[in-house]
Image (spheres, rainbow, N blue to C red):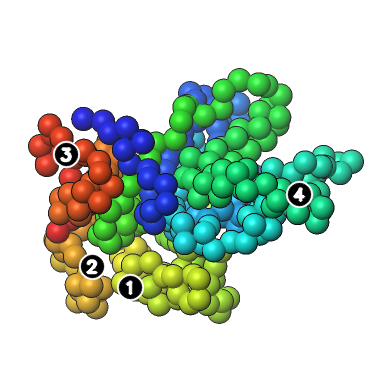
Amino acid sequence: MAIARSEVVTQGVEAYYHCVSRCVRRAFLCGLDSRTGRSYEHRKAWVQARLKDIAAAFGIEVVTYAVMSNHLHVVLRTRPDLVEGWSAEEAAERWLTLFPSKRDEEGQPEAPSRAAIELLAGQPERLTEIRCRLGSVSWFMRCLNEYVARMANREDGCKRRFWEGRFNCQVLLDDSALLACMAYVDLNPIRAGVAETPERSKYTGIFDRIQARISGNSQTWLCLLGDEGHGDSQGVLPIGRDDYLSLVDWTGREIRLGKRGAIPAHLSDILDRVPMNQPCWLDTVQGYGGLFHRVVGRLDAMMAAARLLGKRWLGGVRAGQVAFSTA
């Protein structure tokens, strides 16, 4: 039973979402078109750069992402607390940066002027609408997908539809669902045979985290993990970056080899801190992409969230049809 997006994405509530956008048939987001021999790999940089730009403007953090040949994955965390904490001027400046009113001779957006920022900041009703949009998953994905579609169509010299339709969205209700989704997204290039290891999986969240570790940086532009949070940047998951990298690396090797072994002893403490059935971990990550439901998490987490938000996610549906349980 499909669940309407309005029943899943709720404004003003901190939550995690897995969003997927797919290209129409024969359209290439990235990769090599074997029919024409044309390469579209450079478009991966477009997506990454745009994600960085809009993440800096929205009250939404990117947990991880993966750019594939005909689709992209983005795992997002909404931060309504940040949106409410912005001053009127800051909210106005963020909006005008996303939607500039002026461009230079080369068509590049100009930084908003102080006068434009103050003018918009002095319109309370308009600013309320803007704050809502800057905290909206739908507006975040719109700013990403419309930008990429325009760039691709301009390069291809056409005006036809680029994306298959509206993006698909799942809400991730607990740590186990979030961790399984992150691992699934970060391992997409390995599952597809595009890369052999996480450190070679360019244009993914895990690649960026690995590069940050190699360079000695304490953080990246992505949402911080459990041992990295400070100030307004609250880390996600009860595990740190190195633990997460170790877990995904081991999972990727096992999936590629098609083996089903016990979780290594040195990783057991990681999984103990996240409620899940350890022997089912590989099946959980491998089977994640086959889920069609928009609400992902243990049954108890789903029921609690539904009560809190006043939703009827389980109405008339058996729990096993909707709940994705790793506990």
Distance from the alpha carbon under mark 4 to that under mark 2: 48 Å
Where, quadrant-wise, is the N terminus in this rendering?
top left
Name the amino acid, label 4.
Answer: Leu
Badge number at residue 274: 2
Which label number is shown at residue 314? Answer: 3
The kind of residue on which mark 2 rests is: Val
Asked if residue 98 is positioned above or below residue 265 in the image, the reply reads above
User: Can residue 61 be seen at all in this image of the molecule?
Assistant: no
Residue 327 at what x, y percent from top left?
Answer: 14, 59
How many C-alpha atoms fall within 10 Å of the one at disc 4: few (<14), some, or many (≥20)? few
Q: Closer to the camera, 24 or 76?
A: 76
Q: Amino acid at mark 1?
A: Ile
Query: Disc 1 to disc 2, how far (Cα)?
Result: 8 Å
Viewer-proximal residue among 92 and 192: 92
User: Are discs 1 and 2 less than 8 Å apart at CB?
Assistant: yes
Q: Circle 4 is placed at which residue position?
A: 119
Asked if one can make out residue 174 in the rendered structure from this viewpoint, the answer is yes
